[in-house]
Structure formats: structure tokens, C-alpha cells
Image (cartoon, rainbow, N blue to C red):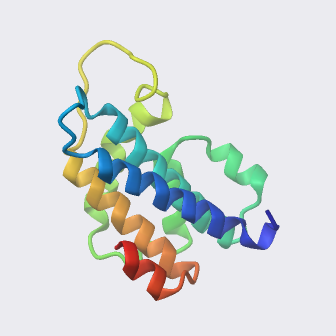
Amino acid sequence: MELKSRHIGLWNYARSFFLAANKLRGTEEMLSDVPIYYLYGHAIELALKSFLLYQGYDEKDIRKIGHDLKDAWTKATDKSLDKPLANTTEISQVIELINPYYRHKELEYIVTGGKRYPYISEMHNVAEKIICAVGKSIDIPKSQLNKYF
């Protein structure tokens, strides 16, 4: 993929993970919401990294962030991603709650013990807000944004 369009490809991946999570929500066969949390978390990660690529971050900078949603969110807000978003407190709180599990791969590999996840509806809302804000910021055509959000 050409370097100039990498941020768009990453955004499209973010949207795909988001839509996959939406399809799984409410599925009767699901024994746990953990896969849905993972998919929303991954959508958030990819969208934020898409925005950072658009803002001039290089691949090395993106790799340093790893899977740390809080770090990616902080860096994105430093580049003004939060400006078009109405309620960044909700976003920060949800990211704060899910980040330890997402960052340490506890949504992919079982780790026993108590956990405190945000509500799945909050994960959905935050992922949707971030993907939409990033889409607008990186000049995704409105027709494409309106089709999914």
C-alpha cells in the first residue's frame, strides 16, 4: 500500500472490526462478550493509529504505541482529534477501563480473576464516535461515512 493512503486502509480496517463487533452483539450463541470487547478495542486502536498516520506519525512511532489505547488516545487528542467530539470524558473513561485488558492481551488469552469492563453499549458508542471523528478528520467522503454511521 502506498504510504500516502495507508491511513485510509487502516481506517477501513477499523470500520470492518467495528461492523464485525456490531454483528456479534446480541448473538444468542455468544457465551461471553469478550470477543466483542476485543473487536471494538481493535477498531479503536486502528482508527486512532489511522489518524496519527494522517498527522505525520511514521510506522516506527505507531509501533511504539503498541496496543496501548490510552497512549494512542492521548497522542490523538494532542493532535486535536477531540475537537469535533462532544463528550471526551466518556471516551477517556471507557478507554481507561478497557485499556489494561486490551493492552495486555487479556481479551485474547484468558486470565483468571475479577475484571471491570465498561458496558458493551459504551464500547460501541466510543468506537463509533472515534471512527466517525477520524473519518471526518482524514477526509473520508461523507457518502461513505453516512453509509455506515
Residue at x-position 39% and y-position 17%: 110
Front position in the image: 9 or 117? 9
Q: Residue, x 68% and y 44% (percent of image)?
A: 64
Quadrant showing the N terminus: bottom right
Q: Nearer the viewer, residue 148 or 10?
A: 148
Find residue 74 and report its horizontal and vertical position in percent: 49, 58
Q: Residue at x 77, y 50 (%)?
A: 60
Q: Quadrant of residue 46?
A: bottom right
Residue 58 in the figure: left or right of residue 65: right
- Tell me which residue sits at (58%, 68%) in the image: 51
- In the rendered image, residue 134, in percent from the top left (x then y), is placed at 49, 72
Q: Which residue is most to the top?
A: 112
Image quadrant in which you'd find residue 33: top left
Q: How many marks on residues? A: 0
Q: Nearer the viewer, residue 137 or 43?
A: 43
144 or 125, nearer to the observer: 144
Percent x, y for residue 37? 34, 40
Using the image, determine if residue 29 lies above or below residue 54: above
Looking at this rendering, what residue extends furthest in the bottom direction?
A: 142
Is residue 123 visible to the viewer in this orientation of the structure?
A: yes
Please give left or right for residue 101 compared with residue 8 in the image: left
Q: Is residue 74 visible?
A: no
Q: Position of residue 95 (x, y in %)?
A: 36, 49
Q: Is residue 71 above or below residue 48?
A: above
